[in-house]
Amino acid sequence: MNELLSEELLSAIGRTAPPCRELVTRRDIRKYAIATGNRQRKYLDGDQAPPMFHVALFWDVVELDQLSPDGVSIDRLLPKFPLEKAMAGGLLIEYHRDIFPGDWLTANRTLTDIYQKNGRSGPLIFYEVVMDVVNDDGDLVIREKTTRILR
Protein backbone atom coordinates (compact mmCIF):
# COMPACT_ATOMS: atom_id res chain seq x y z
CA MET A 1 0.00 0.00 0.00
CA ASN A 2 2.96 2.37 0.50
CA GLU A 3 3.83 2.38 -3.21
CA LEU A 4 4.04 6.21 -3.23
CA LEU A 5 6.15 6.50 -0.10
CA SER A 6 9.79 5.85 -0.87
CA GLU A 7 12.41 5.41 1.82
CA GLU A 8 13.87 8.75 0.74
CA LEU A 9 10.51 10.47 1.21
CA LEU A 10 9.93 8.85 4.60
CA SER A 11 13.43 9.87 5.70
CA ALA A 12 12.14 13.47 5.77
CA ILE A 13 10.13 12.65 8.90
CA GLY A 14 11.76 14.54 11.77
CA ARG A 15 13.05 17.32 9.52
CA THR A 16 12.87 20.74 11.19
CA ALA A 17 12.61 24.22 9.72
CA PRO A 18 14.86 27.02 10.94
CA PRO A 19 13.30 28.74 13.96
CA CYS A 20 11.23 31.83 13.16
CA ARG A 21 11.29 34.62 15.76
CA GLU A 22 8.76 37.47 15.71
CA LEU A 23 7.83 40.41 17.91
CA VAL A 24 4.16 40.79 18.85
CA THR A 25 3.06 44.42 18.54
CA ARG A 26 -0.03 46.16 19.84
CA ARG A 27 -0.70 47.46 16.32
CA ASP A 28 -0.61 43.97 14.80
CA ILE A 29 -2.99 42.68 17.49
CA ARG A 30 -5.40 45.55 16.82
CA LYS A 31 -5.26 45.03 13.04
CA TYR A 32 -5.90 41.31 13.43
CA ALA A 33 -8.81 41.88 15.85
CA ILE A 34 -10.44 44.40 13.51
CA ALA A 35 -9.87 42.24 10.41
CA THR A 36 -11.44 39.20 12.08
CA GLY A 37 -14.41 41.12 13.50
CA ASN A 38 -13.43 40.48 17.10
CA ARG A 39 -15.44 42.62 19.49
CA GLN A 40 -13.67 42.10 22.80
CA ARG A 41 -12.09 45.33 24.02
CA LYS A 42 -8.83 43.66 25.19
CA TYR A 43 -8.21 42.57 21.60
CA LEU A 44 -9.41 45.76 19.89
CA ASP A 45 -7.15 47.83 22.18
CA GLY A 46 -4.22 45.50 21.46
CA ASP A 47 -3.78 44.50 25.11
CA GLN A 48 -3.87 40.77 24.37
CA ALA A 49 -3.75 38.71 21.16
CA PRO A 50 -6.93 36.85 20.22
CA PRO A 51 -6.98 33.15 19.31
CA MET A 52 -5.51 32.35 15.89
CA PHE A 53 -3.38 35.55 15.92
CA HIS A 54 -0.20 33.45 15.75
CA VAL A 55 -1.08 31.83 12.43
CA ALA A 56 -0.19 34.76 10.16
CA LEU A 57 2.55 36.02 12.51
CA PHE A 58 4.96 33.38 11.23
CA TRP A 59 4.05 33.39 7.54
CA ASP A 60 6.92 34.20 5.21
CA VAL A 61 6.71 37.50 3.38
CA VAL A 62 7.78 36.64 -0.15
CA GLU A 63 7.67 38.00 -3.68
CA LEU A 64 4.78 36.92 -5.90
CA ASP A 65 6.99 34.60 -7.97
CA GLN A 66 7.78 32.64 -4.79
CA LEU A 67 4.14 31.63 -4.30
CA SER A 68 2.58 28.37 -5.44
CA PRO A 69 -0.18 28.55 -8.10
CA ASP A 70 -2.82 28.73 -5.34
CA GLY A 71 -1.13 31.77 -3.75
CA VAL A 72 0.54 30.05 -0.81
CA SER A 73 4.18 30.46 0.16
CA ILE A 74 6.17 27.36 -0.76
CA ASP A 75 6.96 25.42 2.41
CA ARG A 76 10.66 24.54 2.26
CA LEU A 77 10.28 22.15 5.22
CA LEU A 78 8.43 19.66 3.02
CA PRO A 79 9.99 17.16 0.63
CA LYS A 80 8.80 16.84 -2.98
CA PHE A 81 5.72 14.62 -2.85
CA PRO A 82 4.52 12.45 -5.76
CA LEU A 83 0.99 13.89 -5.29
CA GLU A 84 0.53 17.67 -5.33
CA LYS A 85 -3.13 18.67 -4.93
CA ALA A 86 -3.32 19.71 -1.26
CA MET A 87 -6.38 19.72 0.96
CA ALA A 88 -6.84 20.55 4.62
CA GLY A 89 -6.82 17.46 6.79
CA GLY A 90 -7.07 18.98 10.24
CA LEU A 91 -5.75 21.57 12.64
CA LEU A 92 -5.33 21.06 16.37
CA ILE A 93 -4.23 24.09 18.37
CA GLU A 94 -3.39 23.89 22.07
CA TYR A 95 -3.09 27.25 23.84
CA HIS A 96 -0.81 27.21 26.88
CA ARG A 97 -0.23 30.92 27.56
CA ASP A 98 -1.76 34.22 26.50
CA ILE A 99 0.08 36.42 24.01
CA PHE A 100 0.72 40.08 24.81
CA PRO A 101 2.28 43.04 22.99
CA GLY A 102 6.04 43.05 23.46
CA ASP A 103 6.31 39.26 23.53
CA TRP A 104 9.04 37.77 21.39
CA LEU A 105 7.82 34.41 20.11
CA THR A 106 9.77 31.70 18.34
CA ALA A 107 8.11 29.07 16.16
CA ASN A 108 9.80 25.70 15.71
CA ARG A 109 8.26 23.49 13.01
CA THR A 110 8.84 19.76 12.58
CA LEU A 111 7.56 17.34 9.96
CA THR A 112 6.31 14.60 12.29
CA ASP A 113 4.63 12.05 10.04
CA ILE A 114 3.99 10.96 6.45
CA TYR A 115 1.60 8.14 5.63
CA GLN A 116 -0.58 6.85 2.82
CA LYS A 117 -4.22 5.74 2.67
CA ASN A 118 -6.44 4.73 -0.19
CA GLY A 119 -9.46 6.91 -0.88
CA ARG A 120 -12.40 6.47 -3.23
CA SER A 121 -10.54 8.25 -6.03
CA GLY A 122 -7.17 6.62 -5.40
CA PRO A 123 -4.17 6.94 -3.12
CA LEU A 124 -3.84 9.81 -0.65
CA ILE A 125 -0.72 11.01 1.13
CA PHE A 126 -1.10 12.56 4.58
CA TYR A 127 1.57 14.59 6.31
CA GLU A 128 1.65 16.22 9.72
CA VAL A 129 3.62 19.24 10.86
CA VAL A 130 3.87 20.26 14.52
CA MET A 131 4.71 23.85 15.37
CA ASP A 132 5.72 24.74 18.91
CA VAL A 133 5.63 28.44 19.74
CA VAL A 134 7.70 29.43 22.76
CA ASN A 135 8.42 32.75 24.47
CA ASP A 136 11.88 34.04 25.36
CA ASP A 137 11.68 32.25 28.74
CA GLY A 138 11.33 28.96 26.85
CA ASP A 139 7.72 28.52 27.98
CA LEU A 140 5.42 26.74 25.54
CA VAL A 141 2.80 29.24 24.36
CA ILE A 142 1.10 27.28 21.58
CA ARG A 143 1.36 23.82 20.06
CA GLU A 144 -0.22 23.48 16.63
CA LYS A 145 -0.55 20.24 14.67
CA THR A 146 -1.48 20.61 11.01
CA THR A 147 -2.51 17.65 8.87
CA ARG A 148 -2.63 18.03 5.08
CA ILE A 149 -3.87 15.57 2.50
CA LEU A 150 -2.37 15.26 -0.96
CA ARG A 151 -4.14 13.64 -3.90
Image (spheres, rainbow, N blue to C red):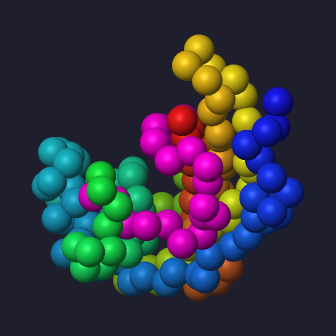
The picture quadrant where one finds residue 4 is top right
Residue drawn at x 35%, y 61% as measured from the top left: 68
Image position, residue 62 (x, y; %) = 30, 78
What is the magenta segment's predominant secondary structure?
loop
Q: Which of 59 and 77 is in front in this view?
A: 77
The picture quadrant where one finds residue 136 is bottom right
Residue drawn at x 69%, y 73% as measured from the top left: 16
- Give the residues drawn in magenta, as a range: 71-92
Residue drawn at x 76%, y 64% as measured from the top left: 12
Residue lying at the far right in this picture: please name it. 7
Q: Is residue 70 left or right of residue 117?
A: left
Q: Considering the image in quadrants, where does the N terminus appear? A: top right
Q: In this view, does 115 lie to the left or right of 150?
A: right
Image position, residue 44 (x, y; %) = 17, 58
Magenta residue check for 72: yes
Q: Which of 84 and 148 is in front in this view?
A: 84
Q: In this view, does 14 lie to the left or right of 40?
A: right
Magenta residue check for 19: no
| Visible residue check, residue 135 | no
Q: Considering the image in quadrants, where does the C terminus appear? A: top right
Residue drawn at x 65%, y 47% as measured from the top left: 127
Residue lying at the far top in this picture: please name it. 120
Q: Which of 42 and 26 is in front in this view?
A: 26
Q: In this view, does 133 lie to the left or right of 22?
A: right
Residue 143 vertical placement versus 2 (above, below):
below
Image position, residue 54 (x, y; %) = 41, 62
| Visible residue check, residue 27 | yes
